[in-house]
Image (spheres, rainbow, N blue to C red):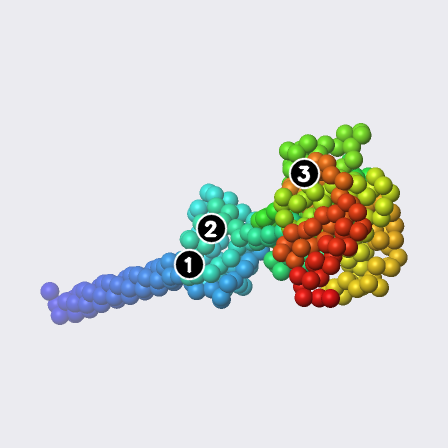
């Protein structure tokens, strides 16, 4: 074979070897890059999903009904509860059961994305606890609702003054829900409206009324009994005295005497926004149908929200001839059948207070 024939063959084999080396090197580089990319993406996913996020202190988030997964993810990211909206949406796409629940969520500690997703999936929502003591007025309740973060006091008063259809069968002439917002401990969430919260309180009243036999039939005197119960509730905190206090007011009504109930005057001033925190002699002349010093009979409606005990006392008062009562200075009252006896009790009360 000639030298000229051998050289091309040698060059050809040399180039093939070089090509194979280049191919192998390129393949290795691509595999290395791919593995690096996979590791990077995997690390990113692991960081986004499994590394706990510490939210800002006491982060509260309201997820309203109708929010999409995209909106929920955006709200969580904005609140600092998760790191990535995309990671949350992808996780939800792979874990569609259970569905995400609307509600208010309180995030107080570090949590991973799956933990956050699981909480919203099972509806582990935050409830605001509101305790309404016996004898609270609608103004007191409104303040309690505002303090619990459930809405403004003014808005709740507006609801109490306008949603009278909730009790129209019980008190057709009612000017507000006063008297029918039953004292209790409630748990509300901010996804509920103030109207719904007020309706829950009225529903509780209806349940108690049914338990004690305070029915709403054609001949019902529900409004009268609730009004009387509200006065009794404001006059004494001693449960055993309530039926006796009720008897005093029923006796005065029967004799067509003015009720002379101080709490009714206070309520008259609460309605006009003029109450200064204490009652003075001049206040007894206020021109209001709620002023039982000036106007005979019961006021036109309840002056507070009575509890079960006061309602029962108004339904079943003691049978007495008492017409007056005054504090004894120790949380109870002295009762009297005549004005002379009452005046002696007043002197004893003033003496107990160190007054002349």
One can see residue 7 in this view: yes
One can see residue 15 in this view: no
Q: Earlier in the sequence, mark 3 or mark 1?
A: 1
Quarter placement of the C terminus: bottom right
Q: Residue at x 44, y 46 (%)?
A: 95
Quadrant of the image occupied by residue 173: top right
Seen in the image, is 74 located left or right of residue 334? left
Residue 283 pos. (x, y %): 83, 62
Q: Is residue 13 above or below residue 288?
A: below
The reply to whether the C-beta atoms of the residues labelled 3 and 1 are less than 8 Å apart is no
Quadrant of the image occupied by residue 205: top right
Q: Residues within 10 Å of mark 1 (few under 14, many from 20)?
A: some
Q: Earlier in the sequence, mark 2 or mark 1?
A: 1
Q: Residues within 10 Å of mark 2 (few under 14, many from 20)?
A: some
Q: Is residue 49 above or below residue 300?
A: below
Residue 15 pos. (x, y %): 22, 67
Residue 111's disc number: 1
The reply to whether the C-beta atoms of the residues labelled 2 and 1 are less than 8 Å apart is yes
The reply to whether the C-beta atoms of the residues labelled 3 and 2 are less than 8 Å apart is no
Seen in the image, is 40 located left or right of residue 208? left
Question: Which residue is label 3 attached to?
Answer: 312
Q: Residue at x 88, y 53 (%)?
A: 294
Seen in the image, is 331 located left or right of residue 7? right
Instruction: Tell me how far mark 2 sits from mark 1, CA to CA.
Output: 10 Å
Q: Residue at x 88, y 57 (%)?
A: 287
């Amino acid at each position: 074979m000639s030298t000229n024939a051998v050289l091309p063959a040698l060059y050809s084999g040399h180039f093939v070897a070089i090509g194979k080396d280049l191919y192998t090197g390129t393949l290795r580089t691509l595999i290395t890059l791919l593995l690096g990319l996979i590791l990077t993406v995997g690390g990113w996913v692991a960081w986004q999903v499994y590394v706990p996020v510490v939210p800002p202190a006491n982060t509260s988030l309201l997820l309203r009904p109708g929010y999409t997964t995209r909106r929920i993810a955006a709200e969580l990211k904005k609140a600092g509860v998760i790191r990535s909206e995309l990671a949350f949406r992808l996780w939800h796409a792979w874990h569609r059961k259970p569905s995400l629940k609307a509600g208010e969520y309180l995030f107080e500690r570090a949590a991973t994305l799956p933990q956050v997703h699981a909480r919203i999936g099972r509806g582990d929502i935050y409830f605001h606890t509101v305790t309404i003591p016996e004898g609270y007025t609608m103004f007191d309740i409104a303040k309690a609702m505002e303090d619990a973060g459930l809405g403004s006091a003014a808005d709740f008063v507006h609801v109490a003054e306008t949603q009278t259809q909730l009790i129209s069968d019980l008190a057709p002439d009612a000017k507000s829900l006063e008297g029918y917002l039953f004292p209790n401990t409630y748990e509300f969430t901010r996804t509920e409206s103030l109207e719904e919260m007020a309706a829950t309180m009225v529903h509780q009243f209806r349940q108690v009324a049914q338990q004690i036999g305070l029915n709403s039939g054609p001949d019902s005197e529900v409004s009268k009994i609730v009004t009387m119960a509200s006065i009794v509730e404001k006059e004494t905190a001693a449960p055993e005295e309530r039926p006796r206090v009720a008897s005093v007011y029923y006796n005065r009504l029967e004799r067509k005497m003015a009720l002379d109930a101080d709490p009714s005057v206070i309520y008259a001033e609460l309605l006009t926004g003029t109450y200064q925190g204490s009652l003075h002699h001049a206040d007894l002349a206020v021109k209001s149908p709620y002023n039982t010093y000036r106007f005979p009979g019961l006021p036109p409606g309840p002056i507070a929200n009575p509890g079960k005990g006061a309602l029962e006392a108004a339904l079943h008062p003691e049978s007495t001839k008492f017409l007056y009562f005054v504090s004894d200075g120790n949380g109870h009252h002295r009762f009297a059948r005549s004005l002379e006896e009452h005046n002696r009790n007043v002197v004893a009360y003033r003496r107990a207070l160190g007054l002349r």
